[in-house]
Amino acid sequence: MPNQSLPEETPLFAEFDRPTYEEWVAATVKSLKGKSFERLTRSSDEGIPVKPLYTRADTAVYTHPHTIPGHAPFARGTEPDGYLIRPWLVAQELAYPTAEQFSRALRYDLERGQTAVNLRLDPPTRAGLDPDQSKPGEVGWRGVSLATIEDMATALSGVDLARLPIFMRVGTAALPLLALLAAYLRRNGKDVSQLQGCLENDPLGVLTHEGTLPLSLNQAYDEMARLLLWVEKHAPRLSAIGLHSYPYHNSGAYAVQELAFTLGNGAACLRAMGERGLDVNVTARHMMFHFAVSGDFFMEIAKLRTARILWSQIVAAFGGNATAQKMKLHVRT
């Protein structure tokens, strides 16, 4: 049999000369019809110069673009296979006033591609109040009113929470809402340990957004610790802390400020839970971050990558292991 060998591969576009940076600039200037190249450079809200043209030399000093997904510092994601096995969750918020309306809208969306339950609650529910204790106009305002197990059963009718994650922005009522959810599941013979998703417990976020808390911050952290202990024992797949960047982003914070405030909130939670005897690995594992993003595509991608890198470093500084350093991330457009 004659000796056979594969033909040598020819690099793609090898027949063309590689243009230099100066040639790219010259081509750009020509298209500007007399305007200067420097006019295309702008400054972002963060004070970062955004150039019209980038080359490999601009990123030569950075090491994180060459890191591997699933490995610290997690710039390119926390899973080695990206989202091939576990794709993004679609968790559209449904701001309906009654449990019946929410249930109908949820089932409609689940049949059309939504893959998680995002149960948005009205102000009295987030404050742990019954509807008859609320102020006029608050019941059903921008969210569902839940006060009883029957309300929870109606809202989640036909929904399999062993299969679908649930997200609830619980305000300062994390413990009573978890109790309501667990009671509903147990009454219906469901396994609480299969719960997944996040009870978005964020006392500093509530304080920032509302300007006040119905209890002291220390008391809020005490409740957070009790919540974490219960979840770790009975519902280990459920996140019990959900820290939001929305109050800062929606108040005009640019990316650097948003990262500083939100990650600072995360560090405060790690410290507070440590003071209450919880291991950093337990706290970080049950924590999720919820970031708002704007239409500034490249800056927002950089923000999310930076968030993962910095959070990995923060958890490591608290003594957390590699698994605890992985940021759980939910993004809201």
Image (cartoon, grey):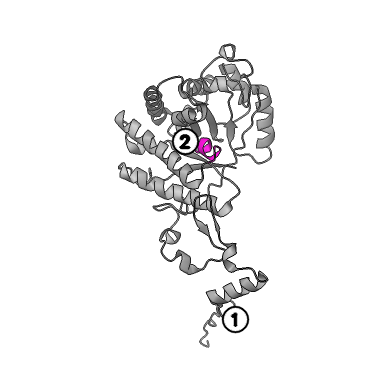
Badge 2 local density, few (<14 within 10 Å), some, or many (20+)? many
The correct choice, above or below, for 80 with respect to 118 in the image is below
Q: Which stretch did the figure color magenta?
A: 245-252
SS assignment at label 2: strand
Q: Is residue 143 left or right of residue 288?
A: right
Which residue is at 59% across, 63% downward?
39
Residue flagged by tag 2: what amino acid is it?
Answer: Leu
Please tell me the numbered disc located at residue 243.
2
Residue flagged by tag 1: what amino acid is it?
Answer: Phe
Please tell me the numbered disc located at residue 136.
none
Image coordinates for residue 30, horizontal then vertical, percent: 65, 74
Quarter assignment of residue 102 = top right
Res 158 visible:
yes
Which residue is at 45% across, 35% downward?
237
Which residue is at 52% across, 85% downward?
4
Image coordinates for residue 226, horizontal then vertical, percent: 38, 24
SS assignment at label 1: loop
**Front-lying residue, 146 or 124:** 124
Q: Is residue 254 left or right of residue 270?
A: right
Please tell me the numbered disc located at residue 16.
1
**Front-lying residue, 110 or 57:** 57
Q: CA distance from mark 2 to mark 1?
A: 51 Å
